[in-house]
Image (spheres, helix red, strand yellow):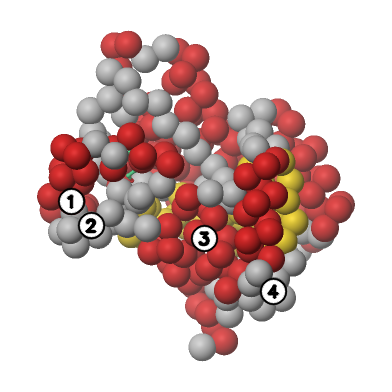
Amino acid sequence: MDKFSLEAKRALVTGGSRGIGLGIARGLAEAGADLILVGREAKSLGEAREALEKTGRSVQAHPFDLSRVSEIPDFYKKIVHEGGAPDILVNCAGTICRSPAENLALEDWRLVLELNLTSVFALSQAFAREKIADRKPGKIINIASLMCESVRRQTSAYAASKGGIRQLTKALAVDWAMYGITVNAVGPGYIKTDLTRALWEDRDMDAWVREHTPLGRWGLPEDLASTAVFLASPAADFITGQVIYVDGGWLATY
Ligand code: GCO
């Protein structure tokens, strides 16, 4: 079972202070990884750090707004300088703006694409440049979505960004395989987090999600953690360019 261990590894998790990011960070720590958490709000990041330190792993917290894409290279250099280079990068930070496409402000479109897609490219590039220069392998895990394959009304920017993540995962996997850097993605179904609160608090939407999910329930952040641990571990050394959907069977019905 050592192939699933993350002992002596360091994992950087963006969006690590809540929801899916926090669930995955906890799973990585329980598998033995030390953590670097990146999130926009210092308060919730500090709370997540305190909670995750209970796993016995070292946890660093770096407040940063990843939508400030041009500042990502310097931010990454600061992280490496302060605590050493991560071996694993989990790109989980993201947002959604639900609106009929005809009403979607261009600024909202840009914000969703900047955070959900462009910042993932920029941070992955900073990670890869450092690994390539150090001649060390690395693991990148992006957070995709069932919306890589199917959509719902009023989610144009989010669905476009997640479709982009699906293709970016493949493209970076192909570019960086020669350096021993694998790039994969976990594709969540409907997961009970703050990002989907507006849906699970709505009785009709709650029923719709349960009806369209063969396993009949909302997913939880911990449902995603084990897949992320697997992809981050030596057990997945021959896997790259893949999206593994953890969606309760949602896409099986499409
Ligand atoms: C929505 C939801 C979805 C989920 C998730 C499913 O508005 O339909 O927010 O987009 O968040 O992406 O994988």
Under circle 1, the secondary element is: helix
Residue at the spot 41% in from the left edge and 39% down from the top edge: 195
Q: Which of 220 and 240 is in front in this view?
A: 220
Under circle 2, the secondary element is: loop
- Disc number lying in front (3 or 2): 2
Marks 3 and 2, how far apart at CA: 19 Å
Marks 2 and 1, how far apart at CA: 5 Å
Q: Can I make out residue 2 in this image?
A: yes
- Asked if the residue under mark 4 is in contact with the one under mark 2, i.e. CB atoms within 8 Å, the reply is no
Q: Which of marks 2 and 4 is nearer the N terminus?
A: 4
Question: Is 185 located above or below residue 113 in the figure?
Answer: below
Q: Disc 2 marks which residue?
A: 217
Residue flagged by tag 4: what amino acid is it? Answer: Gly
Q: Which of marks 3 and 1 is nearer the N terminus?
A: 3
The label shown at residue 56 is 4
- Asked if the residue under mark 1 is in contact with the one under mark 2, i.e. CB atoms within 8 Å, the reply is yes
